[in-house]
Image: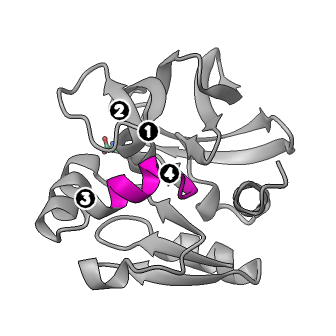
Amino acid sequence: MKIGVFALQGAFLEHEQALSRLGVEWREIRRRTDFTDGLDGIILPGGESTTQGKLLHEEGLFEPVKEAIDGGLPVFGTCAGMILLAEKLSNDQNVYFGALNVTVKRNAYGRQLGSFRTELDFKGIGRIPAVFIRGPYVEEVGKKADVLASVDGNVVAVRQKHLLATSFHPEITDDLRVHAYFTDVIRGKI
Ligand code: GLN
């Protein structure tokens, strides 16, 4: 199995480390020529979604990646990656890949309380540590998406077939179970 980790901007190194610890091969995607056949899934990391969206267009990556996602390529989006996957943003006019049947609120926890560490119950995994960094949350979940985790009544993890998205950053904890969950999604195990 080989996973493409988008490395245009943001927290991609930690995803690479998590995949290596799981024994999963990965490749950094920075330019159009990095995004070739032979990838079993991709990770859209946290960072700044507006910047990432701009860079995806500038590098000529946006269209081919959108096509691949629409065609069923498994994707795991964390934080800004969740924003890029959403069909709608409640406080931003931009829409990026528009694949995930949810409405997402950017910077949903405000500037002061935006970053925190907690524990949550993740459906199919159990209790996991979760780090939030000026994260979004899901305000509305459409029919096609399933809720995997919530914090204080706010949805922070969703799955829709080949799409997995979390508001938080599993890659910056030692717990590898969400990445392992994504590899199970790729293998069609769950
Ligand atoms: N606040 C960022 C955004 O809106 C997301 C934060 C993150 O990815 N850690 O793009």
Label located before the other in sequence (3 or 2): 3
Q: Mark 1 touching mark 2, by CB under 8 A?
A: yes
Question: Magenta segment: does it hold 142?
Answer: no
Identify which amino acid the numbered label 3 is placed on. Phe
Report the side of 125 relative to 138 (left or right). right
Label 3: which secondary element: helix
Identify which amino acid the numbered label 4 is placed on. Gly
Disc 4/disc 3 C-alpha distance (Å): 15 Å
Q: Residues within 10 Å of mark 2 (few under 14, many from 20)?
A: some
Identify which amino acid the numbered label 1 is placed on. Gly
Report the side of 76 relative to 80 (left or right). right
Q: Residue at x 15, y 56 (%)?
A: 54
Does the numbered disc 1 mark a residue whose Cβ is under 8 Å from ligand 1?
Answer: yes
Dot 2 corresponds to which residue?
Answer: 107
Dot 3 corresponds to which residue?
Answer: 62
Dot 4 corresponds to which residue?
Answer: 77
Residue 163 in the image: x percent, y percent?
57, 45
Identify which amino acid the numbered label 2 is placed on. Asn
Q: Residue at x 49, y 24 (%)?
A: 138
Label located before the other in sequence (1 or 2): 2
Q: Nearer the viewer, residue 41 or 151?
A: 41
- The magenta segment is 65-75
Label located before the other in sequence (4 or 2): 4
**Residue 179 falls in which quadrant of the image?**
bottom right
Dot 1 corresponds to which residue?
Answer: 135
Q: Residue at x 59, y 16 (%)?
A: 143
